[in-house]
Amino acid sequence: MRITRRLEFDAGHRIPSHQSQCRHLHGHRYAIEITLIGDIITAEGAPQQGMVMDYSEVKRIAREVLVDAWDHAFLAYRGDTVVMEFLKTLPGHKTVVLEAPPTAENLAVAAFRILDAAYRDTYGNHLRLDRVRLYETPNCWADAVRGEV
């Protein structure tokens, strides 16, 4: 069984080598969908009976390990020396430094890797992360899928 929880966050970025508007500093209202796969818990009287995982737990974990860190941050590519130098002039600025340009594709892969370590088979129901879908805009998204990242 698959379940999905959607969360939203705001962040800024730029794609330094882009040949159009995205080379400029700008922001997005991102959405992230976290899809987990596992067996439905059947243990009689268990708080999660009938669930793969409680949606509130999916949200809590995602916020703790990813969303709170990325929300209202600037997602900066380590190789973008212009932006990295600029951000140093803003004391206390919330910055997340990434190893690749912050495209939707790269952010989806980074999010998958971070979240994959956080969702564990704690209920004995073979729970694992299956997919992360990251929306850069309502019409544009990238999927990072287990076995493909």
Image (cartoon, grey):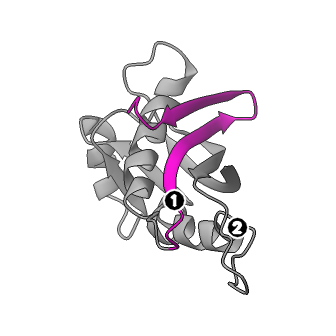
Q: Is residue 144 magenta?
A: yes
Check disc 2 and give the amino acid type: Tyr
- The residue at which mark 1 appears reads as 127
Please name the residue shown 61% across and 66% down the image. 58
Q: x and y percent of residue 5 in the render?
A: 69, 56
Q: Is residue 11 magenta?
A: no
Q: x and y percent of residue 56 in the render?
A: 69, 73
Camera-side residue of 122 and 78: 122
Camera-side residue of 130 and 39: 39
Q: x and y percent of residue 49 in the render?
A: 72, 75
How many marks can you see?
2
Q: Which residues are magenta?
A: 123-149
Check disc 1 and give the amino acid type: Leu
In the rendered structure, which disc, 2 or 1, sits on the residue that comes first in sequence? 2
Using residue 23 as the reference point, say whether residue 98 is left or right of it.
left
Please name the residue shown 71% across and 66% down the image. 51
Please name the residue shown 65% across and 69% down the image. 41
Q: Quadrant of residue 116?
A: bottom left
Kindly report the distance in space between the C-alpha atoms of the residues bearing marks 2 and 1: 13 Å
- The residue at which mark 2 appears reads as 55
